[in-house]
Amino acid sequence: MLQDTFGRRFYYLRLSITDVCNFRCQYCLPDGYEGQAQTFLSVNEIDTLVKGFAGMGTCKIRVTGGEPTLRKDVSDIVAACAATPGIQKVAMTTHGGKLASHAKSLADAGLSQVNISLDSLDPAQFALISGQDKLNAVLDGVNEALIQGMSVKVNTVLLRPFAESQLSTFLDWLKDMPVTVRFIELMETGQHKAFFKSHHTSAEPFLARLKAAGWEVLKRGADAGPAVELQHPDYAGRIGFIMPYSSDFCSSCNRLRVTALGKLHLCLFSDNGLPLRDYLLRGDVSGLQGFITEKLADKKVSHYLQDGVTGITKNLSMLGG
């Protein structure tokens, strides 16, 4: 079992397969993708990586980007993860713009959960935040994922001055929509410090308001993310809040991250990535496991976001969030 010096166990790997994204979200890539052509991890390398993590107790893989559906072999990657002994759940985070056409092949490959970035249900507001007039395409992706039997979560970044309208419209939507909407506090990154200062708002008042309105907090699973999730008997869907600036946020950390170039990040806001690719190219599972176990001793107790530390993370597309 992967465990750090603070007793935290790591059941969950976030695996980026590309840093390319074709959306222009204000809080991530407002000027569009500006990276250079690179050789991302192959299916064979990913197979070695996942075997290594699964052999050390990891049971959940989340495929991320950038935008993972921009890779033509995305279904092959999901299938390789799902076929690995010990892996019980394969999930994906996507902007959802191409999900309607990919949902069936992804479900057939073994994808059981999808998280879709959807910051507004208002077409004009959605286009303003995401840089793309594709709200209907994303909503089609939500519906198709549900048809394919996937568990669907919607990720919404709380942004001042939109937060009140975001909460109101999504609450109405959840009356009949069997998905979980997770409101995520905007996180500071290296390229967007000014945007953070002008748009960050705390989720705490919204969480308190829902508790007062009869929403009940659910118990968190061992492989679950950091969200506080709530349910209400009058709603088909659920609400979640991800609050990285809360005092105890890092105490429940249960995930590690690997970039599309094969670097291990012990935290989303770490100072550097640790190279794994030599092990992956050789198919060296035991060497990979030894290296990860050794380096895990360096994982810090906190991300230190509350102190304005953003590490190497220029934007969230670099590491898949």
Image: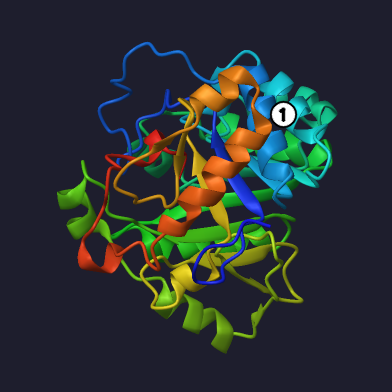
Above or below, comparing residue 267 to residue 127 in the picture: below
The amino acid sitting under disc 1 is: Val
Q: Secondary structure at mark 1?
A: helix
- Left or right of 233? Residue 198 is left
The answer to whether residue 19 is seen in the rendering is yes
- Whole-percent x and y of residue 75? 72, 22
Residue receiving disc 1: 78
Q: How many marks?
A: 1
Above or below, comparing residue 287 to residue 69 in the picture: below
Above or below, comparing residue 209 to residue 47 in the picture: below
The answer to whether residue 113 is seen in the rendering is no
Q: Residue at x 37, y 66 (%)?
A: 302
Occupied quadrant, residue 106: top right
- Left or right of 292? Residue 234 is right
Q: Residue at x 40, y 35 (%)?
A: 317
- Whole-percent x and y of residue 81? 73, 32
Occupied quadrant, residue 64: top right
Occupied quadrant, residue 306: bottom left
